[in-house]
Amino acid sequence: MPEDDPSSTSIGPEGSAAHRPPTGWTALAFSTDSVYGLIIVAGMLVVSTSLSVSSGEALLSVATTLLVFFAAHVYASAMSHLALEETRGSLREALAHGVRESAGLLVAGVIPLVMLVLGLFGIVQDADALWLALGVDMLLLGVLGWFIAAARTTNTWIRISSVLVMGLLGGILVLLKAAVHH
């Protein structure tokens, strides 16, 4: 298929926008830890809704869980970084590396946590805040699916399929996480 064909599903040539690695906030948003953070948040929200907790309790639970997982990821990344033979940096450098590698986990939770804050301050009812946070979280998984597909193809149907697959797989993982946690 020609490169200028908008229905083309092939990946662009080397050096094209489709092959440039993301940087800055984009890299953070598409990081493994960001996707994992969204799944953790959604799983905790499903557990919170099934336990009928307040938005404040859910906020505390989700934020604490994210912080614990973030600390574990920073630790694992730092230790792995120090263990690499070609890496001869200090513990401080390794921890900084771990924070950079794991920051997506925290960033992913910001918008859903803001939805819980709305419930905490009575702007929306507690139950609505929980469902709103879960809905936003799942929407973010779908949006990630769209942009991942958009980096690889201009075909709208493949992009929509990516949103559906990302949402479906994310939903399955969320339910499994909630089942294990509950």
Image (cartoon, helix red, strand yellow):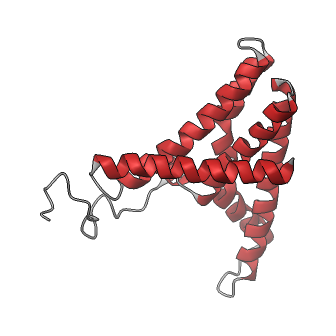
How many discs mark residues in the rendered view? 0
- In the rendered structure, the answer to whether residue 163 lies left or right of residue 123 reads left
Tell me where residue 20 appears, x and y as whole percent: 36, 62
Relative to 99, does residue 67 appear above or below in the rendering? Answer: above
Is 120 in front, or is 42? 42
Q: Determine the image quadrant of residue 130.
A: top right
Asked whether residue 21 appears in the rendered view, the answer is yes
Q: Determine the image quadrant of residue 131.
A: top right
Q: In the displayed orientation, state which residue is furthest to the top.
A: 123
Which residue occupies 72% across, 48% down?
Answer: 175
Is 80 in front, or is 32? 32
Is 158 in front, or is 4? 158
Which residue occupies 43% across, 54% down?
Answer: 148
Tell me where residue 74 appears, x and y as whole percent: 76, 61
Relative to 62, does residue 33 appear above or below in the rendering? Answer: below
Asked whether residue 103 appears in the rendered view, the answer is no
Q: In the displayed orientation, state which residue is furthest to the bottom.
A: 85
In the picture, which quadrant includes the N terminus?
Answer: bottom left
Relative to 56, does residue 16 appear above or below in the rendering? Answer: below
Which residue occupies 79% across, 54% down?
Answer: 69
Is 15 in front, or is 123? 123
Q: Determine the image quadrant of residue 85.
A: bottom right
Tell me where residue 71 appears, x and y as whole percent: 81, 56
Relative to 167, does residue 50 appear above or below in the rendering? Answer: above
Tell me where residue 97 appears, x and y as whole percent: 68, 64
